[in-house]
Amino acid sequence: MDLSILLGDLFAPAMLFFIIGMLTVFIKSDLEIPPEITKAAAIFLLISIGIEGGAEAVYALQKEAGLLTVILATAGIAIVVATISVVFNATIFSKIGFSTADAWATAGVYGAVSSATLVAAVGVAEAAAKAVPGELIYVGWMPAANVFLDAAGVIAAIFLGRMALARESRAKQAISIDKKGLFHEALVGYAIWLMLAGVIVGVLSSIFSPDRLDSANAFFDEMFAGILCIYLIDMGMLAARRLGELKALGSRLVLAIVAAFGLPQIWAGAAMLGMYGLHLAFPGMVGWGDAFVFAAMAGSASYISAPPALRAAIPEANPSTYLPMALALTFPFNLLVSFPLWKMMAQALWGAL
């Protein structure tokens, strides 16, 4: 791979703003981004990704009806990867000294999807696609798989975690679980619902009002890169502030760091290979950029959508264990180290290097 391309990704404005956000905390600057601005930026980015994903799915299906099979297969792969990752990760966390509750809650965070990681991955894939407009690199519908990864990861962690806790205490009855409430939270929580809403708008508008959809997309496309930079500088500041909480892990810290960096590579790789299998089975329908985005979702760790549901369902778990790991370790590592690796892996599989 050309070194200039790798450096271009690492020194892209979005990535640099994330690093500057961390430096802002380290040098003790008085910079503060109001929470309202960060939330508004997140709303904009998630809706933008959802609209584009829904619209691109419709456009692709209009050109090739067989893509529906690929989309359904992607949803199936997402559910399988999320569920298996939760079980495997919980086992690993238990072996490095986490309590049963902490192991399953942390596994749930790692089985779910980081919206910020998804947003950043879409930015990388879209930039690559725009650089070579004539090639199939990123179709754009892949973010819709977020709901299947996120919901499957959270639900699996909650139900299997509660079963494990019940067995551990040898109790005949586990703590009462509001199953309907958990499913509702997993499927229509803040981040997922915004993206689903965008997908719905993108699908319906592309069918019945494509001209007006183009006008709306022009606004979102023009603003996306700049708002992403604002969002990531705040994420960098938040990640740096969480670093101090890692001290609570004590003697488990080293192994926790290894897990926080290593486990995402396993599941991103599994997701990537799943997409490559679809690429071989259905040539011309999945680009390496789509595989990269899917891998980024599978290799991320949620610190926004999953923790509230996990805290309610597994109250025995300590948030100071799973939140700092996801936000202060995995998130920055993925952006700065994993992204270039996953991009190269996707390009190598697709023969694009």
Image (cartoon, rainbow, N blue to C red):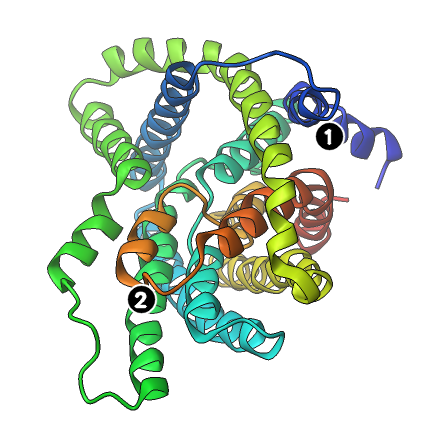
Q: Which mark is residue 9?
A: 1
**136 above or below 168?**
above
**252 above or below 237?**
below
Disc 1 is placed on an element classified as helix
Apparent side of residue 25 relative to residue 170 in the rendered image (left or right) = right
Circle 2 or circle 1, nearest the eye: 2
**Residue at image coords 56%, 54%:** 299
Q: How far from the left and from the top, in percent, is residue 25?
A: 67, 24
Q: Which mark is residue 158?
A: 2
Dot 2 and dot 1 residues touching (CB under 8 Å): no
Q: Quadrant of residue 269?
A: bottom right
CA distance for labels 2 and 1: 37 Å
Neighbor class of circle 2 (other Cα within 10 Å; few <14, some 14-19, many 20+) is many
Q: Residue 152: in sight, yes or no?
A: yes
Q: How far from the left and from the top, in percent, is residue 203?
A: 23, 32
Q: How far from the left and from the top, in percent, is residue 79?
A: 36, 63
Q: Residue furthest right?
A: 3
Disc 2 is placed on an element classified as helix
Q: Residue 134: in sight, yes or no?
A: no
**Residue 77 versus residue 146: which sits nearer the camera?**
146
Quadrant of image for the N terminus: top right
Number of marks in picture: 2
**Residue 167 versus residue 331: which sits nearer the camera?**
167
